[in-house]
Structure formats: C-alpha cells, structure tokens
Amino acid sequence: MFSSATRRRLKYTLAADVIDLVVKLTPFLDGDDGPPEAINFAGHKSFNEVGDLTVKLMQDHAGLREGDRVLDIGCAIARNALALQRAFGSDVSYDGFDIVPYGISWSKKRFRDLPGRYDFHHADVWNSFYNPRGKARAEDFDFPFADDLFDISVSTSVYTHMRKKAVAQYLAETARVTRPGGRAYFTVFGRDGVGEGSTYSFQHAGDGDWVEDPSEPEMAVAHDLDWLRAHLEDLGATQIDIHPGYWRGGDGIDFQDIVVATFGEAE
C-alpha cells in the first residue's frame, strides 16, 4: 500500500516519537546486551559482535588506546559506546551524537548506571532516510564541541548515508575538533569499488557522488576516494590509510571501506 520510502518516513517520524516515549517512560525497550531488534537501527548483523569488531579495528589501525577521548559521529544506539565500555570501561572518555532522538534516549538510559564518562547528544540534522523532520542541514552543521578536544573519532556507516557537501562539512568539523596528532576512523563506499560481484552498483550520479536508489538517495551513497583523500589533505591530514571493504566482492577487514586519517603532528 505504501512505498518503502513512505514506510521509512513514518518509521522515523510518528513511530519514532512513540518509541522515544516508551524508552523514556517504561522498561519495555531496555533490552539485555543491547537494544531490542525492533528498535535497533545500527545495522542488521550481531549488535555486539559488530561493535567489538569496530573497536578492535580502531585499536589495530587507528591506535585507539587507554586514556583517549573519543568522539562517535552518528553514534546511533550506543553500539560503539557499549563496545568501548566492554573493552576499556572508564579508561576512555566518550561523546557521541546522532540524529535519531530515541537512539540518544536509549543510550543515555543504558549508561546511566555504567562506570565511566559516556555522554550522548541529539543533533537535529535533516536526513531523508533517518530524520526527515530535522531542522539543521548537514552541510551547515557545526559539531557542538571545542577545537582540539578529541584524540580519536569514529564514524561507522554514516557517510554511506550522506551526500558529498554534507560529508565535506562533517570532515571539516572532525578536523577542527581533533587535537594535533589525533585520528579519524570512518567508513565509506568508494565508487571505484563497483564491479563484478560488488554489493551495490551506484549507477546514479549526483552532485559529486553516486546513489544506489534515486527514490531514497540517502539509503546508500558512494564517494570518490581521490576526492576524499584530497579533501582530508586540505584539512591538514598528514597520513591517510584506506582499507577496501568486502562489499566490493573480494576480501576485506570489514564490509565497508575504512579510512583512517591522522591530523597534524602530536605536540
């Protein structure tokens, strides 16, 4: 009766309001090791396994360590935060923000009695896929944090749902809030990965990016890795490592392509 785009819009508007109230006022959606599957919007694979893998990859490829102050850009519903808490407890400091209100409400409630400094913030940023009522535009959004504050940032499966101008702004803000010598760890779909056996085709060109489905453009977005590298260098990145994902149809350490950028030299 309804198109997939209409159903998704309802899910992240009217249904999201109800979910947020239930999360805040009742224990029905508290979950056990993570959120109930019905409200999990952080991917369809094992919630904890994916979070633990992200933290392990950040340790192996981005130098995540005890004492780091971590920024989680598009933190969703605490998947990375819970994995960090399992791995480090109170030995890291954490801030995360996301555009889905009930994800932030659930995360705050879950961490209320857990040790360590883990803070969650709602950013009312428009996205046709996840927040169609958002007031701010991603390409104009300034992160609500001071300069040179974080040692490392993580953004998993966020830029795969954002257009080029928005990604450019988020990366600029990432560079601003990252201390000299700090690192950014994020995932993307690189358009060069399209080929025989790849999960997506990204045949529909946009304004400097490519989308899988024009009717829901933010469902899956690919970016030019050469442009990403050049933009990061313009922002002060002194080292950029790219690890292809297995969405391309071959081997990889994770499904999406991973980019690790180091900004400047440590003081």
Image: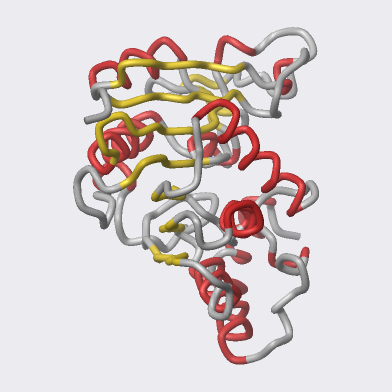
Residue 6: give x, y in percent of width and height. 62, 57
- Vertically, is 6 above or below 200? below
- Vertically, is 78 above or below 212? below
Q: Residue at x 53, y 79 (%)?
A: 112
Q: Nearer the viewer, residue 32 or 150?
A: 150
Q: Residue at x 59, y 17 (%)?
A: 243
Q: Nearer the viewer, residue 106 or 54?
A: 54
Determine which quarter of the picture holds residue 180: top left
Q: Residue at x 59, y 40 (%)?
A: 219
Residue 17: give x, y in percent of width and height. 54, 77
Q: Residue furthest bottom?
A: 25
Determine which quarter of the picture holds residue 97: bottom left
Residue 89: give x, y in percent of width and height. 58, 60
Q: Relative to residue 12, is residue 153 drawn left or right?
A: left
Q: Relative to residue 262, is residue 210 drawn left or right?
A: right
Residue 107: give x, y in percent of width and height. 56, 69
Q: Residue at x 47, y 54 (%)?
A: 92
**What is the quadrant of the C terminus in the image?**
top left
**What is the quadrant of the N terminus in the image?**
bottom right
Q: How many marks?
A: 0
Q: How is the image coloured?
A: secondary structure
- Vertically, is 143 above or below 258? below
Q: Nearer the viewer, residue 211 or 155?
A: 155
